[in-house]
Amino acid sequence: MTRGLATRLTAIGIVVAIVVLLGFTMTDYHRGLGARVGIYFIAILGLNILIGYTGQISIGHGAFMAIGGYTTAIMSNYHHTNLIATLPLAFAITFVCGVLVGIPSLRFRGVYLALATFALAVSVPQLPLKWSKWTGGSNGIRTHTTPGNTWLYEVTWACVGLAFVGAWLILRGRTGRAFRSIRDSEIAAASSGVSLPIYKTLAFGISAAFAGVAGSLFVLVTNGFAQPNEFGVTLSLQILIGAAVAGLGSLYGTIVGALFVGLLPELSSSAPLIGSSHGQDVVFGAIVILVMLLLPNGVAGLLHAIDSRVKSAIKSDPTAS
Amino acid sequence: MLGLTRKTKVSTGASLPVLAGLAAAAVFLLIGCLSSDTFAQQTVAGLSQGAIYGSLALALVLIYRATEVINFAQGEMAMATTYIAYQLTLWHVTYWLAFFLTIVIAFVLGVVVYGVLIRPVQHRSVIALVIVTVGMFILIDGLVTWKWGADLKFMAAPFGNQVYHAGGVAFSRQDLGVLLISILSVILLWVLFQFTKLGLAMRAAALRPAAAALVGVRVDWMLAVGWGLAAVLGAVAGLMTEPYVFLQPSMMQAILLYSFAAAVLGGLESPAGAVIGGLALGVFLNLFGQYAPRDIGSSELRLPVAFALLLVILLFKPTGLFGRKQVRRV
């Protein structure tokens, strides 16, 4: 156990070191890209808490990102609020929204929940078009100030750190156990005294709040514009795919999912054969399907399998230890 | 034999109040059509739109009954097969020949998709299945855009542009043709399921896979045929949508969302419910857009209204109009 903890801490240390070092050495453009990866990290982490740990599927997290993003844009545009101050506000608002969505979702399970949250992903980006007086319609609404890429990189990865520690603290104790027991069997969880309504809505709230903060940062990284089509269904699907690639139920895998979703458009646009934005979709879809077919537990599951294979090899070897 | 009669009862198991409500709605529509020309026009247009929603919703229901998953890629599969028909017409195949060739191709595609992509993950979890279909969504979208480009393409109008006048009401030939073809394909499918040995085997494979396998039904093949037929329905829906929105990679996305709502309205398990749900939704949305106060009847809110409806149904009558209650075993 202590050895496991030590390796984990080392891994985290290495990632932190890489992030900090890259922050000093990268070009401005790549810092913007790095900030995007961090944003996907937060959103995927949030979705993973819901899907991977509580077993509730959501295809609607783009909707929460939209709510968070519009919170930041509107507060900054109308009230000139400090951009950093809008982040906790987005967190709080989307937490409440998540709980509100979580309450009716108590009645859905499986495919029905997927459909209901999909409805959310489709409907919410249409709403700013309707109330264009306050939200700027399809042109979007702009924040009062637009930060530079260095600022974005630092703030995003600071948020990533907070989110990761927060998620770890939530999931390691009583709450995390309750989440996992709901995932494994709702009936067993309820009969051992876990309140399904409380913990399911809580999971929805936390997960939505993470997505909300990611949405706020997302608006800032797209030049401070909150636009309806930025938060379309595709965004929801991307986050879901990121979580699947990372491995549902793995906090550490999230980084792989974030890198995949954040960097694939960039990498595939410069690849020789598929050098177009459509080729990127082909690669994206193909990889997702392959991952689901070949690695049911995502990249994290693969690493875990390799790890236990190595361990058992060491154990069976009498000369070792 | 006893088991069979029970199943037939289940598939048409709408409760009396639901049937009475539908009859009342039909009478209301009839009176409306007779008293107002605009109303009649909107109703016919709504019916032909609704027939498209209904046939795609039926495809979703077929797949849900066979593999217990919502196929999020259903619309994109339909779109891709429509592009295949377009390619055939480019090669100077006449429209209707291309139509039937496309149906054959769609069937094969559906079977292949099931065998290669769905079967391996079928018994894993709902989440895995949903993610695979989402992956298919993105993959097909990318492939089509890669091959044919994202710009609008035009096919010859299959029904011409004539407009018939009856009383003061104008009916476009296109609306009527779409309605006819969609309903015809649904009826053919119903005949297949209800009166042929293949249909019987498919129903058995979907309802009781283990028991069906014991009496010699090849369950995997039957489920694959189910996917194939769903792809055929999708192809018909795609070809019937094309005259309205023209050919573009995103042509079926909104339609798919409406057919989700239609399928849930009818009860995800019920084929008849899906078709009636589709027709009802098409008519309702058209009339709502025409007569609701401008604030909420505007076209931006067409999709959110459909989905608000979906949420309300899920919350208050999760089995839809024609579904039956499911009892879950611990």
Image (cartoon, rainbow, N blue to C red):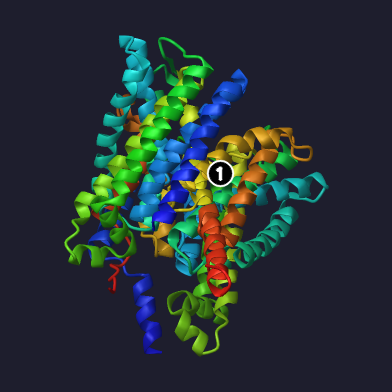
Badge 1: few (under 14), some or many (20 or more) residues near its Cα, within 10 Å? Answer: many
Which residue sits at x=56%, y=23%? A31
> To which chain does the residue with label 1 belong?
B
Q: Quadrant of residue B225?
A: bottom right
Q: Say if A156 sits above or below B235 in the image.
A: above
Q: Which residue is mark 1?
A: B252
Name which residue type carries label 1. Met
Is residue B274 visible in the rendered image? The answer is: yes
The percent position of residue B49, horizontal first and vertical second, equals: 49, 45
Which residue sits at x=66%, y=39%? A280
Which residue sits at x=56%, y=39%? A259
Is residue A60 visible in the rendered image? The answer is: no
A121, B243: nearer the viewer: A121
Left or right of B44 on screen, residue B230: right
A110, B17: nearer the viewer: A110
Q: Quadrant of residue B250?
A: top right
The percent position of residue B247, horizontal first and vertical second, equals: 65, 39
Q: Say if A245 sits above or below A62 in the image.
A: below
Left or right of A245 on screen, residue A98: left
